[in-house]
Image (cartoon, rainbow, N blue to C red):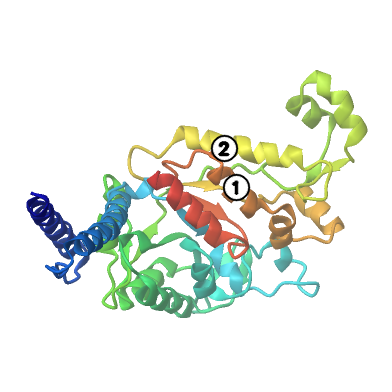
């Protein structure tokens, strides 16, 4: 009787194992095999089969998670966007005071930012003297755009595992006569799909976007022209002056006396500052408001600008503190704080899209992992 029970249990495990492994084969492109049966030690075989089933079940769960991620609308798929990405090529430091307040990304190029977790780029092109380069406002970034695009394509081909590894280029502020045509030609020469009609984004899923952006080399890169709700809020700055109007408009009357007696004449976001709670709380409030607004119904991309904005006051205070845009992020540990808020569920990112940051290589990989985990939970 005991032998008969073992036999039927073995049969059930065979059927379950075959079903599980066949599913993996169909969905993962790998060969499926059935564990060999040992008549001399059926109990050991059962344990082995059960172990294999648990392993395959874990794999199936992971595959289902990836499927759920790629079935999401593109504008609800969390991606870290490198703000003013091409400024990675600007020289900074004491000899370049203007660049210090234009350079939003560390050295390392687009490949470096991708390695650090960036999956989308704020891409600002300029046709300058017949050469296609980049810009940040009035600051020209004299680096070849075609060369930078080659970096993105090469990285995507070498690192793409599935549709969720899609790299998105948001092309905007194309400056100079003939810039649009030159940019389109650069994309076409590298087989990068370029969406110029925003209506094409409505209903577009991550999987569909990746299919459109599939490269001959196996990677996924999709470019989109001016289809972003940016949620730009200029006063979300690291530093500024504390005026009577600002204090009255920001703090309750009962707190005002404490504020005036404890804060300096300016506020600052750096970890060492006694006034950092003010800019940080303003940032958290802004991010919460964007999350509550949610993704645009028409499929447009949208961003949480999780970065310190520039104002005349923030630059003046920053210069006095020997800081810069990169240093403001680093000295405030903003990217790390963002990751903590996602992990601790203090920031709702379940339908977040482009999380736009400065200095992506300071904590970008941890932030991306936290965002993806939050959207799958």
Residue 62 placement (x, y as % from top left): 32, 55
Give the residue pinned by disc 2. Answer: 346
* C-alpha separation, residue under disc 1 versus residue under disc 2: 8 Å
Determine if residue 166 is in view.
Answer: no
Q: Residue furthest front?
A: 1
Q: Residue at x 71, y 59 (%)?
A: 330
Mark 2: give few (<14), some (14-19) or many (20+) Cα within 10 Å.
few
**Residue 180, visible in the rendered structure:** yes
Residue drawn at point x = 45 percent, y = 46 percent? 374
Foreground of the two, 350 or 109: 350
Farthest-out residue, right: 261
**Label located before the other in sequence (1 or 2):** 1
Figure check: 36 above or below 144: above
- The residue under label 1 is 340
Q: Position of residue 210 (x, y in %)?
A: 29, 61
Mark number displayed over residue 58 = none
Q: Residue at x 50, y 38 (%)?
A: 348
Residue 202's image quarter? top left
Q: Quadrant of the C terminus?
A: top left
Left or right: where 259 falls relative to 164: right
Marks 1 and 2: CB-CB under 8 Å? yes
Q: Residue at x 67, y 37 (%)?
A: 282
- Nearest to the observer: residue 300 or residue 307: 307
Q: Is residue 204 left or right of residue 238?
A: left
Label 1: element kind:
helix
In the rendered structure, the answer to whether residue 181 lies left or right of residue 333 reads left
Badge 1 crowding class, 10 Å Cα cut-off, few under 14, some 14 to 19, many 20 or more, is: some
Q: Is residue 172 left or right of residue 153?
A: right
Q: Describe the element under mark 2 as helix, strand or loop.
A: loop
Residue 338's place in the image compared with 31, above or below, is above
């Amino acid at each position: 009787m005991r032998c008969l029970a073992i036999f039927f249990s073995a049969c059930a495990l065979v059927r379950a194992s075959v079903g599980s492994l066949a599913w993996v084969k169909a969905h993962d492109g790998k060969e499926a095999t059935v564990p060999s049966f040992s008549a001399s030690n059926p109990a050991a075989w059962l344990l082995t089969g059960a172990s294999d089933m648990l392993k395959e079940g874990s794999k199936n769960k992971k595959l289902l998670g990836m499927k759920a991620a790629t079935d999401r609308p593109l504008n609800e798929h969390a991606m870290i966007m490198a703000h003013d990405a091409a400024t990675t090529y600007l020289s900074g430091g004491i000899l370049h005071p203007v660049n210090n307040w234009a350079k939003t990304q560390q050295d390392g190029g687009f490949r470096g930012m991708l390695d650090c977790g960036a999956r989308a780029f704020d891409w600002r092109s300029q046709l300058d003297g017949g050469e296609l380069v980049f810009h940040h406002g009035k600051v020209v970034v004299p680096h070849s755009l075609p060369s930078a695009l080659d970096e993105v394509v090469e990285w995507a081909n070498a690192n793409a595992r599935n549709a969720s590894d899609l790299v998105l280029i948001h092309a905007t502020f194309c400056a100079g006569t003939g810039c649009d045509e030159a940019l389109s030609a650069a994309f076409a020469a590298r087989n990068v799909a370029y969406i110029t009609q925003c209506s094409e984004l409505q209903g577009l899923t991550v999987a569909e976007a990746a299919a459109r952006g599939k490269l001959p080399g196996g990677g996924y890169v999709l470019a989109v022209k001016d289809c972003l709700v940016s949620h730009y809020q200029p006063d979300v700055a690291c530093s500024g002056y504390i005026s009577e109007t600002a204090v009255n408009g920001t703090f309750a009357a009962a707190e005002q006396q404490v504020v005036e007696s404890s804060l300096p004449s300016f506020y600052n976001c750096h970890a060492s500052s006694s006034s950092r709670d003010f800019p940080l709380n303003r940032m958290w409030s802004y991010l919460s408001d964007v999350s509550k607004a949610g993704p645009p119904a028409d499929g447009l991309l949208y961003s949480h600008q999780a970065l310190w904005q520039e104002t005349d006051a923030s630059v003046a205070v920053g210069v006095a503190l020997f800081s810069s845009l990169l240093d403001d992020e680093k000295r405030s540990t903003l990217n790390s704080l963002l990751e903590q808020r996602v992990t601790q569920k203090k920031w709702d990112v379940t339908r977040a899209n482009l999380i736009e940051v400065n200095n992506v290589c300071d904590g970008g990989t941890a932030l991306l992992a936290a965002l993806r985990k939050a959207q799958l939970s």
